[in-house]
Image (spheres, helix red, strand yellow):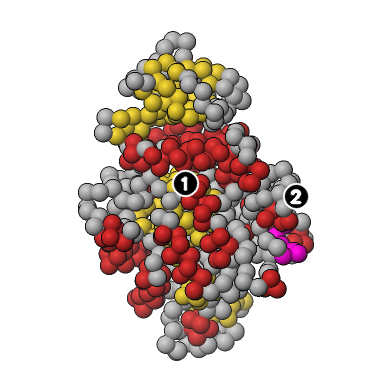
Amino acid sequence: MKQMEANRTNTEPSFWEGASIYQIYPRSFMEVRLEAEDLRGEGSLLGIIDKLDYLKDLGINAIWISPFFMSPMEDGGYDVSDYTAVDPRYGTLEDFNALTSKAHELGIKIMVDLIPNHTSDQHSWFEQSRSSRDNPKADWYVWADPVYVNGERRPPNNWASVFSKPQLEARKRGELGDIPEDQPTPPASAWEWDGTRQQYYLHSFAEGQPDVNFHNPEVREAVKNGMRFWLDLGVDAFRIDAVNYIGKDPELRDEEPNPDYVEGHDSNPYDQLIRYHSAGYTDTFYPYIEELVSVLNDYKDKDPRIIFEAYMPDEDLSKIDSTAPKVASSFNFTRLDIIEDWRARLHQEALDGYYRRLPKGSIANHVNGNHDKPRIASRIGFDPARVAAFINGTLPKAMWFIFQGEEGNFINVEVPEELQDDKLGGRDEERTPMLWTPGKNAGFSDADRLWLPNDSNYKKVNLETQGKDPFSTLNLFKALLAIRNGSPTIKHGNYHPLFADNPDVLAFAGRYKGNQYSTVANFTAREISTRVLRAEHNVGRVLLSSTHLDCKPRLVSLEDKEGTRLGPNEAIVVVPSA
Ligand code: ISL
């Protein structure tokens, strides 16, 4: 393996082109401990090792493991108190090394999170920084003096915390004073007063997640050293968390109000401000991401990779994607953001626009969920979720991100208030434990209590049982991954939009070195027919159908007048018939 990587030439496509990347949320994936009395009802690194063969068999090429670093867990591990240590709840650095070796033996690459914007307030850097105004790390975080309005102390500007949703409940409880009914709920300030320094510190997220001062070159070097630490241990890639926040206005100027904000049921008062100075600030953001990417230059033999997480307008994402298209790109959340609006034409447009805006040499990516979003089956229903997976799994030249449990079409699990963990973000429902078997705790853990409840329906809905059902979503994923892994056209092909004359159909082709395939997807629960134009062939053989996994020989005539027939919620991939 090592030999092969070292010999990779510049013209050879990257490993990441066409890679299927499985996101593991480690706390909910699988628990294995050396001693039974150490069981905690939470996942562990040994648990991940235990499931690597399963992932290999599924057809996965890489795993992204959400944070397992030392953390007080105020934000599910995205509040890191030591980036170079494994939190004991997950195991040890030795466990991580064993995990890396086994994954690499199986040909599975490892992606970990880099969380450059903030640390936990329990990080030694912050403990030092807050101790005085003149210690060596005094300038490692964003500190600012108060302003006084009518003698009252106020934060230096109007920047708000992303975690402003709890304000809605606080308002209902009357904790925010009298707010006229027609006024929106004010967001939570991103500033927290520190009694020792007599200054405010900035936290774009939770109070316990102070933002580091990225304008300080020592801080940037320390963050880059964190990357080097994991690269030297064998990590292959980073998912860089909330990266837009590292680019701030050094002058800390106020944000403008967002005129489009209307408060509704699921709103976040945070969205009342336009993000310009507090995140993604052009003058600082782009140079800083370039600097982070430059770390990879010393690890070229590894074919390393970065994926940036940033919720930003398309123009900004295009700029990120142009920074270093061969090694880094931003998450494509466009379709995920509009997923409930499950209309073929809308999604086709989003898809065409995305491939069009990608810079040359960039690898696309597709996402149907993650630990921050309700599970896709809960958003659009079981059958459309299979269509959504089929589309993502057959899109060409792309990284396919699969959130753990999507392969079982798992749904969100309601978590009673007294058991909730993510008080700030309300994201427990998509983070509940995996459902492996019909046995105790669905095979996730032998403990008597789990950190979050699992789906009580697990005796019926679990991966072991699905393995025996030839039509299950698990078997659909296996079939999709097998096709991907065996098809240079899917892995390296170019995307071509096709035209379906039925507005409920999304269609595209992948073309590579004279080969091609077409994906045609029915977005409705009705049987329909459609003509598909612009494919470079008419008669085709169905290679895989999302609803007929047994794949009895079936020919379609894409362009014929009577059209291609598709069953309810059926997506097919078609290759020219010989
Ligand atoms: O979740 C979001 C929108 O649905 C975003 O606002 C998200 O909070 C933001 O993009 C950053 O997310 C990441 O960093 C957070 C952490 O809570 C999330 O889990 C992580 O994915 C702070 O580190």
Q: Nearer the viewer, residue 298 or 60?
A: 60
The circle on residue 308 is none
**Residue at image location 42% in from the left, 87% down from the top:** 136
**Residue at image location 44% in from the left, 68% down from the top:** 116
Disc 2 is placed on an element classified as loop
Where 513 sits versus 454, above or below? above
Q: Is residue 357 left or right of residue 439?
A: left
Where 98 sits versus 407, above or below? below
Magenta-span inclusion, residue 452: yes
Q: Considering the image in quadrants, where does the C terminus appear? A: top left
**First to last magenta residue range:** 447-454
Task: Report which residue position mark 2 lands on.
Answer: 456
The circle on residue 59 is 1
**Residue at image location 31% in from the left, 61% down from the top:** 2
The alpha-carbon separation of the residues under discs 2 and 1 comes to 28 Å
Name the residue type under label 1.
Answer: Gly
